Amino acid sequence: MWACVAFVLLWIRSAGCTEKANMSKRIEYTAADFYERLLSGKMMFLYFEQQVSPTISLFLVELEKSAEALQDYGVLVGKVSCQKEPIQTYCTEAKQQHTAFLFRGGREFTSFSLDTVFDVNSIVAEVLFAILGDEVRYVHTDADLLAMEKAAKGKKDIVLSYVRSLGTEEHRALMETAYVYGSKYQFILITGGPVLKQLRVNESPQLSRVWFLHCRVHSTSMTPVTPVTSERCPLTQMRKALSTLNLHTFLQLLEAPLVSEVYVDPSSVPPPQSPYQLTPQVFLFSHPATEHLDLDTATALAWRLRGLAMLLLVHRQSPAVKTPEKYNAAYRLPEKSIEVKYLTVHSLDDVLELFTKQEEEDEEEDHVDEEEDSHLGELDDEVAAAVHKNRAHFQDMDSVTQLTSDNFHAEVAQSSLTVALFYLKWDAVSMDFLSSFIEVAERLEDSQVDDVRMCVVDCGEWTDLCAAQPGSAVPFRPIAAFPSVLLIRPQQSAQHYRGMLTGEALHRFIMLSRMASPVLLSTEEEVTSFLQEAPHPDLATYRPDRILGLIRTASQPGLSVFTEAAKSLRGEVLTGLLTDGLVEKWAAEYAADPPAVLLFPSWRKPTARPSLLPVDSSSKELLANIYSALLPPVPELTVENLPSLLSLGKALLLLFVGEEEDEIGQRHNQALVDEMAAVVEQGGVRMERYLACWIHLGRTPAGMSVLGSYLGSMPPLPALVVAHLPTGDEVYQYPANTPVLASSVLHWLQRVEDGMEPPAGVLGGDSWPPASEFYDFLKIMDTQEAEPSPTDGEEAEAEEVNVEEHLVTKKRPDDHLDMNTKFHSEL
């Protein structure tokens, strides 16, 4: 008997191994198979195996799983062993071992990093996403969504889906549904951002969501679930979890009649058939005298129940309706019972509550489950969490050149200006900025800017290039911060980009960097063009600061100082150098004694006289004077210029003004800024220790958080404070509801300096503690080094320690925040 059992077990085991071997054999293609299927034009998702690592082994397992799933969509899945039969195009470069390829119509259609196709769900989702093309669009902003709604009006309805991350099971469910319904509906995918705010959804929702936008038939009789403007399509939200079955049922339900009319008792109406078998039924009763009003009421309720339940209007005029008059509604929940329950309701909200209340309870349970599952993730580093969330967001790198240790010098030598981004794939800021960097590259390409080469360096892969030591062949020091952008020119040291990590700021910096610094100007026409014309049509709306250097001769002292300062300002300021007779003409006109510098700040009117600076003994001093002279008397503080303003080391006299609602409000805010300028002018020398500036809370909403953290609450606007004093961390507030007048402000500042004003708050320290004690690795290391090695007895005692006493529960910083202390963080 046991022999028989053993035989059966061995047979089952061998059958399983045979099946696995057959699967592996089925997805492994020879070179001949590859070319044969390529010529046939079939869609193929292939991986060219070079070396097998643990990561690659896991991917191959998922690749086998996806073969059967993608077969249903006409996609062949396979791998080609480069060691057995090398294919020249795909088996030669080392980086291709981290890439899978999709072939369509006899050519390579697209490629995927293995980081984006890491399991069967991501493989199916990403491949279908690539195949569907126009059927599934990805939008970033509400303006993009609005444009697609306008294009779809009268033509197609839209299925709008939010998924937490690409490559997930929800993403796969959406793509599989889009494959079936793509010709009927326009599918749109979002992963967060402004579109969610427009839909009034929390910025970081825990659950994926789906909305159906009724764009094909836009009637004024529609009563949508969510109020929308006339240019927006009415929408219906799917209230169940995003899965292939739920989404299919939801779409089928929206195709059902909005209101069905019946002439029998609800109990005689059969339960809904497939595919609506799990859909509740709601019955409203109609009377002959109010038939039209009852139909309108039923239609209004049907829109509110759209996608959640089917509504039927029961006509009491039929003799077959025997339901007592005291009942005016009924419902059936087929998933629990086929019994019909009758009730008397006083408003439509009573009916709606029957279904939405249960739905909210189910959603709350799902939310609690997710919070329990993600409890450990809350303790994790925020950057790591962001990387995990966006792990499937990979960019199209066709517009940029990928630099390596092997091709660096050859690629850089081909262009007069190379802009290189050094990044890490696992760094969230790097990956976010990489998207903006690629957008800038595409923008330059569209503008036919051919003298700039946009390149990227993956420092996780090319560590020798990023960590090159001084004295090596590369023109830069080791990269110590990520992301970093360098501007590289042949035979010159690299220039660091230190501006904002946004596409607009980088694009502006690159366009200004294309011009020589300084530009040699030898005629009046060249000077006029330099001072008045935009550096490039793409910068037509941007007015950069401009500087003119007055140097009589090449041998005159100051030329090297000005030239060095001009090189440091390249990309930020346009610098020109006057030569020959122009120097004397401009020096006489502005009473300048060359060598000197004329400054034309962007905030002044073009017709205003320039500022005059002497050329100092060093470029460092000249740069400091230039930066100071380019500042307006009362600069507007923004996120972009905050670092440069704080670097001046002055106390901030900071005015907060609200957003204007009309022209009167604009004039009022301008009067306040003018009064601050009067403070600077009347204060004279004593105001040199302060930087008078202002924040417009409409253009810089972050200022509200700053003001609230300064004072512990939001005061009435306008609000004037002094912070970042060299003498201490106190914050002082100008008396609220007191007119901001120059004389009054100067008197108040004197009282602050004399110690006669009480502080309104205290600056917080610059400490950046770990998210929890759990992550205080330095403290743990210090403790371990300080403690002597335990003896055998101590080890025995240590084993008896109650582990629960050492578990750390993460507490948010505001759990114990006492607002009366008015501590706050730095700007």
Image: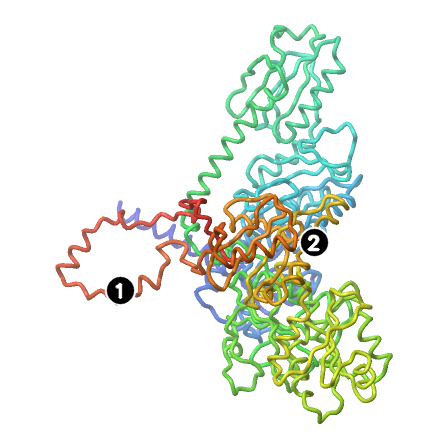
Crowd band around label 2 with a 10 angstrom C-alpha radius: few (<14), some (14–19), many (20+): few
Q: State the image quarter where residue 617 is shown.
A: bottom right
Residue 500, placed above or below residue 475? above
> The disc labelled 1 sits on which kind of residue?
Gln
Q: Mark number for residue 133?
A: 2
Residue 747 horizontal/vertical position (percent) = 58, 55
Nearest the eye: 527 or 653: 653
Instruction: Kindly identify which residue carries mark 1.
Output: 784
Q: Residue at x 52, y 26 (%)?
A: 335
Nearest the eye: 120 or 291: 291
Q: Quadrant of the C terminus?
A: bottom right
Nearest the eye: 307 or 102: 307
Residue 481, placed above or below residue 204? below
Q: Residue 68, can we see it?
A: no
Q: Residue at x 54, y 74 (%)?
A: 94
Q: State the image quarter where residue 1 is shown.
A: top left
